[in-house]
Image (cartoon, rainbow, N blue to C red):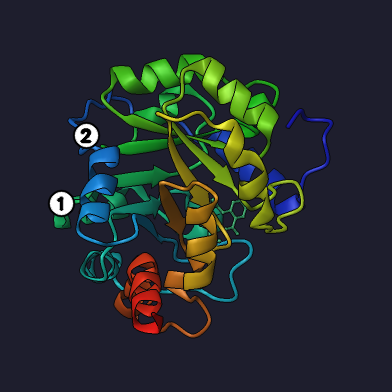
Amino acid sequence: MGDSEEIAPAVQSILDAARERGGSGGRVSVTARSLPDAFDAAADAGRTPVIAEIKPTSPTADGERTDDPVDLARQMVEGGAAALSVLTEPDHFGGSAATLEAVRDAVDVPVLRKDFILHEAQLDVVEADVILLIVRFLEADGTDDLADLLTAARERGFQVLVETHTAAEVEKALDAGADIIGVNNRDLGELAVDLGTFEAVAPDVPEGVTLIAESGIQTADDVRRMRDAGADALLIGSAIMDHDAATDVEANTRRLTRADTDAVETTTTDT
Ligand SMILES: O=C(O)c1ccccc1NCC(=O)[C@H](O)[C@H](O)COP(=O)(O)O
């Protein structure tokens, strides 16, 4: 995403706000809970590996959830989430570093800090097990280099989820040394969601890289579609948070983390 490329106004606003944010001052150092191990443990226990996202609101959400994020986190883990994602972006997603800190203290699964990190200083905000780097955002003028940020994050103990949307971005992520890659079904240029994006891009991600399907996953059928296309795990926010109806987060999570098992049970019953 060069500055000349078309992007949605909401995304431009997210980028502008991210440019203004700094770090907390002190260098953060973390002993991270392993994300791949958490996915393996979930799969071994017969659950679909899901990162459930605490996202109070977003530019595309129909409403806002004001429930206690720690309660939501506990419900997501009870519903079988292998890991959690917590928005720390305050201006467009209602997140905060304090929320992430409280959630990470309350659960024992890995916690992803979901934010829009453009500079090394922005790594020094809060301890998290995983941080997100978005290839497309790091192509904008005046941002740090992806490989440099990846190294700086690992030096602090973070695991790094590198988010892509195209085959070309996957190549950049691999060149930078990424070992956990997300393919976002949401196009940050238009905010349109298409699960076909993951299906088209996943074959370009080599074996040995942990591959995560992100965004737009609503139903158990969507989960199975992404798993069939090669996803080791899924990042799911809106379908679990259900911003407009504020339904039971534990039940929403369970429905999605049981998708693989339910399919096997249905097949066994049918035969
Ligand atoms: O979620 C948004 O509206 C959004 C808008 C602009 C930039 C990023 C946005 N979301 C970030 C994400 O990656 C998602 O929160 C995450 O993948 C979960 O997606 P979903 O399950 O569709 O809520």
Residue 121, position as x, y percentages in the image: 42, 24
Q: Nearer the viewer, residue 242 or 196?
A: 196
- The answer for how far apart the CA atoms under marks 1 and 2 are is 11 Å
Image: 45 above or below 131: below
Mark 1: few, some, or many residues within 10 Å (few <14, many ≥20)? some
User: Which residue was labeled with disc 1?
Assistant: 108
Q: What's under tag 1, amino acid-wise?
A: Asp
User: Which residue was labeled with disc 2?
Assistant: 32
Q: Residue at x 15, y 57 (%)?
A: 106
Q: What's under tag 2, amino acid-wise?
A: Ala
Q: Is residue 50 visible?
A: yes
Mark 2: few, some, or many residues within 10 Å (few <14, many ≥20)? some
Image: 46 above or below 199: below
Q: Earlier in the sequence, mark 1 or mark 2?
A: 2
Residue 225, position as x, y percentages in the image: 54, 61
Q: Is residue 241 left or right of residue 193?
A: left
Image: 164 above or below 198: above
Residue 230, position as x, y percentages in the image: 50, 46
